[in-house]
Amino acid sequence: MTQEKTATITIYTHPDCSYSAAAKDDYLKQGVDFHEIDVTLHPEVIPELERLTGGERITPVIVEGDTVTVGYHGVG
């Protein structure tokens, strides 16, 4: 029997972003573990956020392994 490695999900959020709130709510309801980084509490991550988004300050940004999703369209 093999064990599957669960990818760590990181969500870059902003408290005034309704899409960030929706993403967190959906992941919590589905029991999906994630690590949240609130960019207002951790402004030092903004350069990384901009790198992930091609220079934009957009939230949420969801990183799962090598997959980066800018914005939120529901849990897949």
Image (spheres, rainbow, N blue to C red):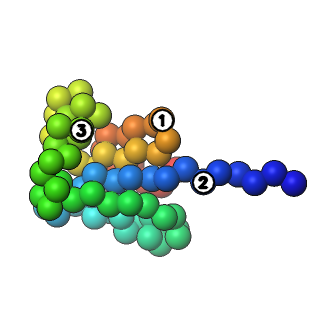
Residue at horizontal 17%, vertical 29%?
55
Q: How would you rate the neighbour count of disc 1 (Cα within 10 Å): few for under 14, some for 14-19, many for 20 or more? A: few
Q: Is residue 18 above or below residue 31?
A: above
The quadrant in which the N terminus is found is bottom right
Secondary structure beneath label 1: loop
Farthest front residue in view: 44
Sequence-wise, which precedes: disc 3 or disc 1? 3
Check disc 1 and give the amino acid type.
Asp
Q: Which residue is mark 3?
A: 48
Question: Where residue 46 is drawn, which disc sits there?
Answer: none
Q: Which residue is mark 2?
A: 6
Residue at horizontal 40%, vertical 38%?
68
Residue 33, position as x, y percentages in the image: 48, 64
Q: How would you rate the neighbour count of disc 3 (Cα within 10 Å): few for under 14, some for 14-19, many for 20 or more? A: some
Q: Is residue 1 above or below residue 46?
A: below
Residue 18 in the figure: left or right of residue 5: left
